[in-house]
């Protein structure tokens, strides 16, 4: 009997280039690194929709689109997007519909039901965990469940989900997905502890810590006097920058408080999200607070260089369920970080080990202002922190290191 060669790796993920979601950037580079190591990879993802929560122009008209690449294939399916984040029923229905459609295409990629080396499923959405299990079982492959944010913990902590029935159902699905995976990968020791606490003792060894990364060859330190700074009319004043999702997981009220305290400093909030309207209302009468929406990835190095100090304010309790991957990009750009975040978690630990910035307790306006005053008062020391952070991220958070970690895990699962 002729044995057919393995189809390679099947990846199920919610975003992939050119979609610009942070998780899309992460999984795109992981796939590129695995391909460079000789793997055939077949990606099943959504049609690009992240920026406006609607399918991007040029991608509409078909529910499924396929393309062949040098390293495998990409299949993009309808994400069933909705722009009303408060409608949990609508969002859950969209996740389920997308996961079902992605599952069908996951079975089809590179040949219906053909054996795969491994299936990698990414969460959120949590529903891809069971989808990944079904695809892995039918393709006779082990399953790696990649966790970017621990759900529903983050949604519960922020109050995004309050219905006890929804919370109970999500927690049941979460635990089932962890138990049915052959390996669960998380971004930090905090997330690893969280996931292990939800598993029986005999399965806790299946949780692996593989951090996210940044391409430090693309994001490099640059002059603060950028074209973007000139475009926004920020002048030569110090710029404190928050770049990312403007959501309810972030304590962005700290920026408003700091802007009141430092009227000669420019505060730039660069991004879109559900909390943007309320934050703009809070900033009325503060001419030193500037809001700008999403900026394309091609201008990310320029955006990062525009800020003299970058802030990462995360609400209390969330650092153990989510790791702000933007920190690596900030450090690669050689800029100091001021993080308002839970103590003794990944971000404060990295800032301490690298010397790349300051961490203060979350949701503490006074501590945040004190930390910012320290950085503003000594620009030379702040610049030195930026240099130290850059040095650390080059050594510890390279795409090559992360790709090889996944390659090693895949080899272990195949031979184990």
Image (spheres, rainbow, N blue to C red):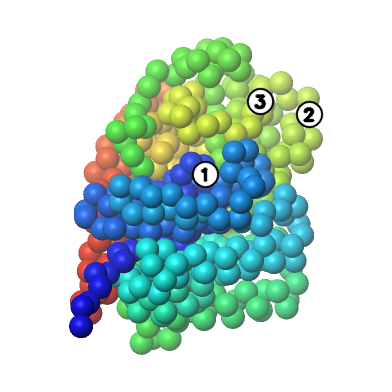
Which residue occupies the foreground of this view, 211 or 79?
Answer: 79
Q: Which residue is mark 1?
A: 19
Q: Is residue 233 visible?
A: yes
Quarter of the image where the N terminus is located = bottom left
Answer with the quarter of the image where residue 205 lies. bottom left
Closer to the chain start, of discs 1 and 3, is 1
Q: Is residue 235 left or right of residue 144?
A: right
Measured Cα–Cα span from mark 3 to mark 2: 11 Å
Closer to the chain start, of discs 3 and 2, is 2
Q: Is residue 316 left or right of residue 3?
A: right
In this rendering, the answer to whether 387 lies above or below 100 is: above
x and y, in percent, of residue 336 in the image: 42, 33
In this rendering, the answer to whether 260 lies above or below 20 is: above
Q: Which numbered disc covers residue 284? A: 2
Please tell me how crowded label 2 is: few (under 14), some (14-19), or many (20+) other residues with Cα within 10 Å. Answer: few
Quarter of the image where the C terminus is located = bottom left
In this rendering, the answer to whether 329 lies above or below 344 is: above
| Callout in the foreground (3, 2) | 3
Q: Residue sitting at 27 percent across and 69 percent down?
A: 6
Q: Are the residues flagged by discs 1 and 3 in contact, CB closer than 8 Å?
A: no
Label 1 sits on a secondary structure element that is loop
Q: Is residue 17 left or right of residue 281?
A: left
Label 3 sits on a secondary structure element that is strand
Answer with the quarter of the image where residue 191 lies. bottom left
Q: Residue sitting at 54 percent across and 17 percent down?
A: 229
| Callout in the foreground (2, 1) | 1
x and y, in percent, of residue 360 in the image: 51, 46
Q: Which residue is mark 3?
A: 290
Measured Cα–Cα span from mark 2 to mark 1: 33 Å
Closer to the chain start, of discs 2 and 1, is 1
Which residue occupies the foreground of this view, 115 or 88?
Answer: 115
């Amino acid at each position: 009997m002729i044995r057919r060669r393995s189809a390679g790796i099947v990846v199920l993920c919610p975003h992939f280039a050119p979609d610009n979601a942070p998780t899309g950037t992460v999984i795109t580079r992981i796939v590129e690194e695995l391909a460079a190591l000789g793997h055939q990879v077949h990606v099943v993802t959504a049609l690009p929709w992240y920026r406006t929560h609607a399918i991007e122009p040029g991608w509409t008209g078909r529910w499924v689109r396929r393309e062949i690449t040098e390293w495998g294939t990409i299949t993009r399916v309808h994400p069933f997007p909705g722009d009303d984040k408060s409608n949990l029923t609508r969002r859950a229905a969209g996740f389920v519909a997308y996961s079902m459609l992605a599952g069908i295409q996951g079975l089809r990629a590179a040949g219906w039901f053909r054996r795969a080396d491994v299936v990698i499923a990414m969460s959120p959405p949590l529903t891809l965990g069971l989808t990944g299990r079904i695809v892995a079982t039918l393709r006779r492959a082990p399953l790696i469940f990649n966790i970017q944010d621990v759900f529903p913990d983050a949604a519960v902590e922020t109050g995004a989900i309050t219905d006890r029935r929804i919370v109970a159902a999500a927690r049941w699905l979460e635990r089932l997905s962890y138990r049915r995976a052959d390996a669960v990968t998380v971004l930090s020791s905090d997330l690893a502890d969280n996931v292990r606490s939800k598993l029986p003792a005999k399965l806790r060894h299946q949780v692996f810590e593989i951090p996210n990364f940044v391409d430090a060859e693309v994001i490099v330190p640059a002059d603060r006097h950028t074209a973007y700074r000139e475009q926004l009319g920020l002048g030569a004043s110090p710029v404190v920058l928050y770049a990312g999702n403007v959501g309810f997981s972030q304590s962005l009220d700290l920026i408003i408080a700091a802007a009141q305290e430092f009227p000669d400093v420019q505060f730039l909030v660069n991004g879109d999200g559900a909390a943007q309207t309320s934050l703009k209302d809070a900033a009325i009468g503060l001419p030193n607070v500037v809001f700008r929406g999403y900026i394309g990835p091609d201008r990310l190095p320029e955006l990062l260089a525009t800020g003299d100090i970058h802030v990462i304010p995360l609400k209390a309790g969330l650092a153990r369920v989510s790791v702000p991957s933007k920190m690596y990009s900030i450090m690669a750009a050689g800029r100091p970080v001021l993080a308002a975040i839970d103590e003794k978690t990944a971000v404060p630990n990295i800032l301490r080990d690298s010397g790349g910035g300051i961490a203060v307790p979350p949701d503490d306006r006074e501590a945040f202002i004190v930390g910012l005053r320290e950085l503003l008062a000594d620009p030379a020391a702040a610049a030195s922190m930026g240099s130290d952070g850059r040095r650390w991220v080059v050594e510890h958070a390279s795409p090559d290191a992360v790709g090889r970690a996944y390659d090693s895990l895949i080899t272990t699962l195949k031979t184990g």
